[in-house]
Amino acid sequence: MTTIAPPPVPPTNPPPALTAGGRTAIRSFLVIAAALVIVGSAVALGVTAWGLSTFRVVADEKPLPGDIRSLVIDARDVPAAIRLTTDGDATEPRVSMRLVNSARAGDQTLDVRRTGGDTVVTVSGARPEFLDWGRAGEITVTLPPDVARRLSVTTRQDTGVLFADADVDVLTASNEDGAVMLSGSARRIDVRTTDADVVAREPLSVRESFVVDAVDGDVTADFTGAPPRTVAVTTETGDVALRLPEPGPYLIRASGESTRVRVPETDDAGRAAAEVTVRSVDGDTTIDHLGSDRMERPHR
């Protein structure tokens, strides 16, 4: 049996039909809205294009002397990262640069010169007038391993990060505002910072001394192999977390808001594997052995 559905019942109060004036008003509204979208997109694209047109990438590369013994990288007025690396395939030491700068600024180039026994690397060129932060980018020093092992490296930065990933003889770093990231090995490491953390990204091999003098920054470092004979870390408003290789013992002098020492200690400097002095004026200090699980950074 087939059932036939009843015809739909027309609405009792159908909406009124649009008048010609109403249809014209709606069309006008849609046209105006579309025009606003198009204009807004064009303005946004124009601003983006203008912004991109005011910047450019500057690149330069220079060889370093093959008999180099002392390298100074003076980047104090350039907010750029500095990278120290070794490359077994490198045939000569070299320094390269990539900077983002204002299109209105003059050319910037690497300046390599000999001053006494030092090879000094700086960035030459006019600073942009309308960008207070100046340039941003990266300066990379690539060293053959045999050159790196006999090299004394000094870095100077006002703003930026130092990535030291090389086996050098001596590393001396000063950093006002940024960070110092350490790995590799050295006979001596000496770091001075104002507002920067000092972090060993992997256990360090330091033969003689590890010295950090920080004003506002945390210091975190692990040491592997034979410990440095002297470890001296001072920070005003930061935490210090060190891990030392076993077996010790160590001559420890530590102070801070909270101090934890978990390595074998001795008061006899002649028996000590190393003398470790750690001081934090407004922070926590922790000294543990390398075999322990990686510590969480102490919290104030």
Image (spheres, rainbow, N blue to C red):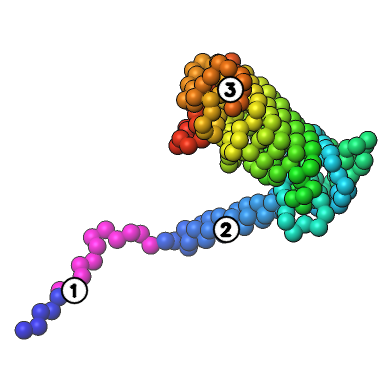
The amino acid type, in three-letter code, at marker 3 is Arg
* Mark 3 neighbour class, 10 Å CA radius: few under 14, some 14 to 19, many 20 or more: few
Give the mark, 1 or 2, whose residue is nearer the N terminus: 1
Ranked by sequence position, the earlier of labels 3 and 2 is 2
Q: Position of residue 19 (x, y in %)?
A: 44, 61
Q: Secondary structure at mark 1?
A: loop
Tell me which residue sits at (88%, 37%) in the image: 118
Name the amino acid type tagged 1: Pro
Between 33 and 122, the one lying in front of the other is 122
Residue in front for this viewpoint, 250 or 43:
250
- Taking the spot 71% from the left edge, 29% from the top edge, the residue there is 190
User: Sequence-wise, which precedes: disc 3 or disc 1?
Assistant: 1
> In the image, which residues are magenta?
6-17
Distance in Å between CA atoms under marks 3 and 1: 106 Å
Q: Nearer the viewer, mark 1 or mark 2?
A: 2
Across and down, in percent, residue 181 comes to: 64, 38
Along the line of sight, which residue is nearer the eye, 42 or 116?
Answer: 116
Q: Main secondary structure of the magenta part?
A: loop
Mark 3 secondary-structure assignment = loop
Amino acid type for the residue under numbered disc 2: Ala
- The mark found on residue 7 in the picture is 1
How crowded is the residue under tag 1: few (<14 C-alpha within 10 Å), some, or many (20+)?
few
**Residue that mark 3 sits on:** 271
The reply to whether discs 3 and 2 touch (Cβ–Cβ < 8 Å) is: no
Answer yes or no: do the residues labelled 3 and 1 have beta carbons within 8 Å?
no
Mark 2, residue position = 34
